[in-house]
Amino acid sequence: MRKRMLKAALMGANARMSSIARMGRVALVGAMVAAALPFVSSCSKDDENAGVYVPPADLSTAEIVQLVKNANAAFSTAKQYTLVEYETGKEDGMEYTYKSERQVDKVAKKRLRTTSITVPSQNVNNLLTNFSYIEDSKDYYFDWDIDSPEDLITGTGKSYTLYNLTAEDLNSYFGDGEDFVYGLDDSYYIWTWKVENGMLVGRRTNSLSYYYKYELTLDADKRFKNEVYTSGYNINDVTYTIITSISYDANPTFPAGFNKADFKENNGWFEEKASRVNRAKAIRE
């Protein structure tokens, strides 16, 4: 939805619907300012630190990089994993949060990826706008393409597509994955590393003045557990932040409230293949 539609709707009775529609279609780029969303937990600090590897403060750069490489290897070969990502931002005075969750079971060859949005000021909580569920070589793909405030009332813009996956497609989803933190040995990037507040903190830059900051927490087995990822541009100080939690289990199931019979077959384009390969490129650059 165009920005002028958002502003116009905010002045009328459809303000709630317009705000969601706008945010469902706009990427976190440009002048949008994002802030980290804290994890909500009733646990004590000791509970939060349980099962966490605390690196020595005097680790060398080489030792830190080796830890990250080892964690990359553990992630790419994991038979099951769940990633939960939060992106928070503010636009026209309204704060919102995107939540993206991915559950992958390489043994059962099942995968669920969902995207939802929360806008507290508009009483919108975890509204599902997109998902992909893979099972038995089929990809059930739901998308809600919102073009107007009324679409959220009438349900207009929803699509239900069924894609038949090839062996190559399945291997891209369920074979060994790519690095979670990529570019460690790429000469195009300049890396700096340090240990800070019990985390491995890396900053990656390139010749275009973009920077990418990784704040990594490892679990007791020295695998990735949490990540706060910040991307920005040095010239105008535009940034956004993604918070990711990682676990090495998964139970992908077809989303409740949907019917597989509603998904109509289409063997043409489907969501970007080898999404793990493109994960960092699509989300982070």
Image: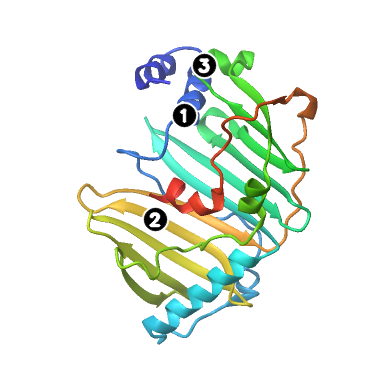
- Is tag 1's residue or tag 2's residue first in the polypeptide sequence? 1
123 and 116: which one is in front?
116
Residue 229, by quadrant, is: bottom left
- Is tag 3's residue or tag 2's residue first in the polypeptide sequence? 3
Residue occupying the far left of the picture: 235
Q: Residues within 10 Å of mark 2 (few under 14, many from 20)?
A: many
| Real-space CA distance between mark 1 and mark 2, rounded to the nearest whole angstrom | 21 Å
- Is tag 3's residue or tag 1's residue first in the polypeptide sequence? 1
Residue at the spot of label 1: 25
Q: Amino acid at mark 3?
A: Pro
239 and 278: which one is in front?
278
Q: Write the residue at 78% across / 43% down.
A: 136
Task: Identify the disc placed on residue 149.
Answer: 3
Task: Identify the disc placed on residue 230.
Answer: 2
Residue 261 shown left or right of residue 176 in the figure: right
254 relative to 225, above or below: above
Q: Is residue 37 visible?
A: no
Q: Residues within 10 Å of mark 3 (few under 14, many from 20)?
A: many
Residue mark closest to the camera, 3 vs 1: 1
52 relative to 139, above or below: below
Quadrant of the rendering where the N terminus is positioned: top left
Residue 161 shown left or right of residue 224 in the figure: right
Place of residue 43 in the rendered image (x, y in percent of width and height, measured from the top left): 66, 64
Q: Amino acid at mark 1?
A: Arg
Total number of numbered labels?
A: 3
> SS at mark 1?
helix
